[in-house]
Image: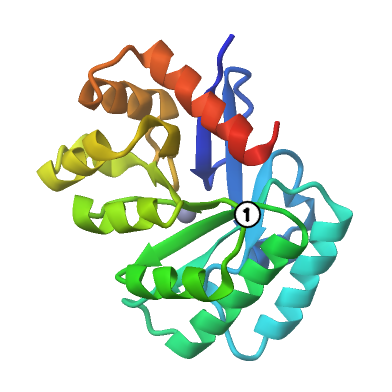
Amino acid sequence: MIPFVDIHSHHFSNRKEVISLRSIDLNEYLKNNDLIISQCTLGLHPWYISKESCYDNLSILEKIIIEKLIYAIGECGLDKLIDVDYNLQIELFKSQILLSEKYKLPLIIHQVKAHEDILKIKRELNPIQPWIIHGTRMKWSIANELLNAGMYLSFGNHLLKSEPHLIETLLQTPLDKIFLETDNSAIAIDDIFVKAAEIKSMEVTTLKEIVYQNFKTVFKK
Ligand SMILES: [Zn+2]
């Protein structure tokens, strides 16, 4: 049976037919060490970065990477619409890129109005680990730049709003670069696959196979 792959979720799933990568912020983990119980990704989310704790948190993150089996680092990234010092965001994003390279783990990226800096940093550091931009809502011209830089794009519940620019982006995105996600929405991953398959004019089963293949490629599973 081909599973649904939910590449980025803040919920725990125990459905056998779903591979769900739960995204955990380090602060969340520090409050509850038992959180890492199955497939998860762990990182310092730009929303929750503080100058006082971020360097300690980075070293805790590295310790956990060494001790436990996490699937990827993230979500991490850059967000221009929040009140967190942007230079600090850049610094911590770069630190997590270096961890992803050092421990050969893919990166799950949160980006809001920061695609130019993400591209600049990628050119500067020239990483070889796969990068997945989660929560894609970009118009095609921006998405295309990220795809040309070798990144994967993950689409979520915004697809259900049928915004024309996002439909265009999904239509143009090559199948071997697509992931789907629930993020923090209560919508089932099945419904996101149904919508994406409808936009791509294909059977849900075919899309499941393609995304599962992408998952195996990126996570070497
Ligand atoms: Zn998220």
Q: Residue at x 36, y 15 (%)?
A: 204
User: Helix, strand or loop at disc 1?
Assistant: loop
Q: Quadrant of residue 67?
A: bottom right
Question: How far across and how far down the image is residue 38, in percent?
Answer: 73, 38
Camera-side residue: 103 or 163? 103
Asked if one can make out residue 198 in the rendered structure from this viewpoint, the answer is yes
Local crowd size for mark 1, using a 10 Å CA cut-off: few (<14), some (14–19), many (≥20): some
Question: How far across and how far down the image is residue 60, in percent?
Answer: 79, 71
Is residue 36 shown above or below 111?
above
Mark 1 = which residue? 129
Q: Quadrant of residue 50?
A: bottom right
Is residue 207 shown above or below 98?
above
Q: Seen from this angle, which residue lies furthest right?
A: 67
Is residue 175 shown above or below 73?
above
Q: Amino acid at mark 1?
A: Gln
Q: Quadrant of the N terminus?
A: top right
